[in-house]
Amino acid sequence: MTTYVPFDRDQPFLLPPDLQDWLPADDIAHFIVAAVDRVRLGAFCTNPQAGGKPQYHPRLMLALLIYCYANGIFASRRIERATYRDIGVRYIAANTHPDHDTIAVFRRVNKTAFEAAFLEVLLLAREMGLLKLGTVSIDGTKIDANASKIRSVRYDRAQVLRDKLAADIAALTARAEAADTEDEDPQALPREIARRAALKDKLDAACARLEAEATARAEAERPEYAKKKAVFEARKGRRGRPPKPPDETPPPDRQSNLTDPDSALMRKSAAHEYRQAYNI
């Protein structure tokens, strides 16, 4: 007979937990806490007033930002959420939860001091052999966009989805009418209709953007095509293939992101994965 490990989510801790026990001994959080303890805080701005709401210690905020940035968490709202959900962040924050405004203000007000302290910690990490620093020359830096790559849609797929969504919306409308006659909850289906209608609008806009880009590209290529065509027609015998006219229709595999149309799928090199990003 199968046996399972017993668990009870309602069981309170019999003794206060030690967050250090929840982290591996080699977790970078331990190094960051120790490194930040060595940083001088004279350049950091603090509120000298004794009254008012207590402020978070600069060492806690500095360690929190460095740890989160080292783990790819940059948005203040995501950092705030991580203080509840991420064990390493929770340990760094000593089980406190600075809100996103506090995190953002600390970084902005102490920008110069924060960057200097971050560099100091990185240099200390290099001296201890935890990482290597050097000079990197680049011709384009891929900066992640605030959009998921799965939200990119191909032109041919977008057209199919538009047709399907239109059919879905019509079917859902019919179901909503039937639900009204049956005196059911009138809110659930209309919300679904609105959601799909909004998605269809996004797909319409994506197709329009791709078509506009294709038209603009075709117009830009038209003078060159006219030159090639004139040369071909002037050639005796007209041997060879005639020049191909510019195509105003987007290629089927051309993509546009529904969340952030200005971003695109790209990768640093053939060895890297595709990411939704900008080329800076």
Image (cartoon, rainbow, N blue to C red):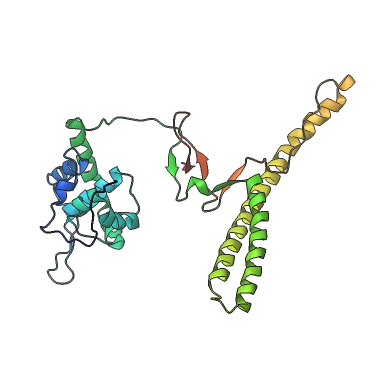
Q: Position of residue 205 (x, y in %)?
A: 62, 55
Of residues 114 and 29, which is closer to you in this image? 29
Would residue 217 appear left or right of 262 to someone viewing this image? Answer: right
Total label count? 0
Does residue 273 appear left or right of residue 185 in this picture?
left
Q: Where residue 68 sits in the image (x, y, percent)?
A: 28, 48
Residue drawn at x 59%, y 44% is 255
Q: Residue lying farthest right? A: 237
**Residue placed farthest to the left in the image?**
15
Image point (28%, 62%), residue name: 99
Point 16% across, 52% down: residue: 59
* Residue at x 47% of width, y 35% of height: 267
Compared to 135, does 264 lie above or below? below
Residue lying at the far front in this picture: please name it: 1
- Quarter assignment of residue 123: top left
- Image quarter of residue 110: bottom left
Percent position of residue 246, x then y = 74, 38
Residue 108 in view of the camera = no
Residue closest to the eye, 169 or 29: 169
Q: Is residue 270 visible?
A: yes
Q: Is residue 212 left or right of residue 196?
A: right
- In the rendered image, residue 212, in percent from the top left (x then y), is placed at 67, 49
